[in-house]
Amino acid sequence: MNYRVLGKTGLRVSEVGLGAEHLQGLPAEQVFAVVDRAVERGINIIDVFMSEPQVRTDIGRAIAGRRDKVILQGHIGAAWLDGQYRRTRDADQCRHFFEDFRERLGVETVDIGILHYIDDEADFDRVFHGDMLRYALSLREKGVIGALGMSSHNPVVARRAVETGLLDVLLFSINPAYDVMPGDAALDRLFDAESYRSPALGGIEPERARLYQTCAAQNVGITVMKSLAAGALLSDRTSPFGRALTPVQCIHYALTRPAVASVLVGCRTPEEVDAAAEYESSTAAQRDYSGVLGTAPLFSMEGRCMYCNHCLPCPAQIDVAAVGRLLDMALLHEGGVPETAAEHYRALSAHAGDCIECRSCERNCPFRVPVVERMRRARELFGE
């Protein structure tokens, strides 16, 4: 594994990191196995945005006794209310759930504290002129967090945050599909087919390039999310370029952006960790993505579930991302619903049949996913 210095933090992070979001809902033994394999492969940075108590507890148990081998990136503003994930800007809730993070992970300090998911100007103003930021800065002043960061998908908002001089780290969504989109585009436009057909799309969009250069100039290190677009870039059918990219090509693309130090790949199994870590032994030819990006975009990713659960909260307590993952697994399987998918579906505490079709999920979804339609399809396939 190779390591890079994460901007002004001085932290040496592995080029390939672990995004822990897909560990939620897995048996503790599987969480342990994934974290074990990551540490074995030299991965030393883990991002944990999830607020669900059990996954936090399991990750804490997984890293127990080897805190010195793990750089933790934890989020300020991710809450667990009424049994569901919520994004919060309430300082008291931020304080409560960040303390919960430290307690459940069994750590006194967190290496990087991330201001969670700020994507529009109004939210930026709310956070950066409010008690949430003051709380985060106090954590850094006290040494409870070593560095302050922010997560975003919007390059204009992200650059505005970087230019405050307050950030040490930016957690940003980077992949070739996103990078050709206009910098002021709303997040849902990242998956609009017409956007990719514009003849003006001839390379990295200037606002995104400007963000990366600003981070480099300010020595703000970038950790990367959404590098594989939840797998959409790995299939000829769903890639907007009409041709699939490999995980190695996606990782390499992100690592070649200025200021990027680590690409955080979401993994559910030790084998997926191995596949991500194989980047380090890949050849120059295997890393080359120019042939794919030189083709004309043919497919839209609009409406594709990214399994991020930003559609929550759900009045029916449905884990929309979990249902979505299992639905997509079933739809891609030509021989009917795989028994493994059916088993995991039955184990969910709420099912697609519990959907009351209020459409609050669709209003919250940043990717314009037709969630209700997908719930109906899941009910048909899984029978409940």
Image: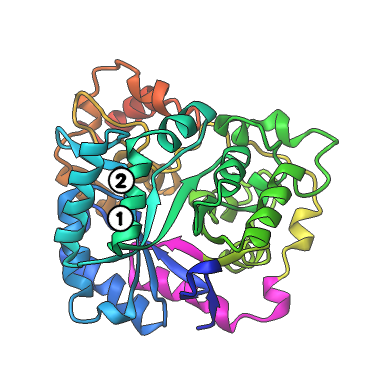
Left or right, 305 with reference to 85: right
Viewer-nearest residue: 345 or 217: 217
Q: Name the amino acid type tagged 2.
A: Tyr
Residue 135: assigned label: 2
Viewer-nearest residue: 327 or 168: 168
Viewer-nearest residue: 119 or 162: 162
Secondary structure of residue under mark 1? helix
Q: Are marks 1 and 2 in contact (CB under 8 Å)?
A: yes
**Residue 272 magenta:** yes
State whether residue 233 is above or below residue 118.
below
Crowding at dot 1, Cα within 10 Å, few <14 / some 14-19 / many 20+, comes out as some
Question: Quadrant location of residue 191?
Answer: top right
**Residue 110 magenta:** no
Residue 139: assigned label: 1
Q: Give the residue drawn at x 78%, y 62%.
A: 290
State whether residue 258 is above or below residue 370.
below
Give how far across and how far down residue 218 sits, in percent: 63, 59
Q: Which residues are magenta?
A: 263-287
Q: Give the residue drawn at x 53%, y 68%.
A: 8
Question: Quadrant location of residue 87?
Answer: top left
Q: Give the residue drawn at x 23%, y 51%.
A: 98
Give how far across and how far down residue 101 sits, in percent: 21, 55
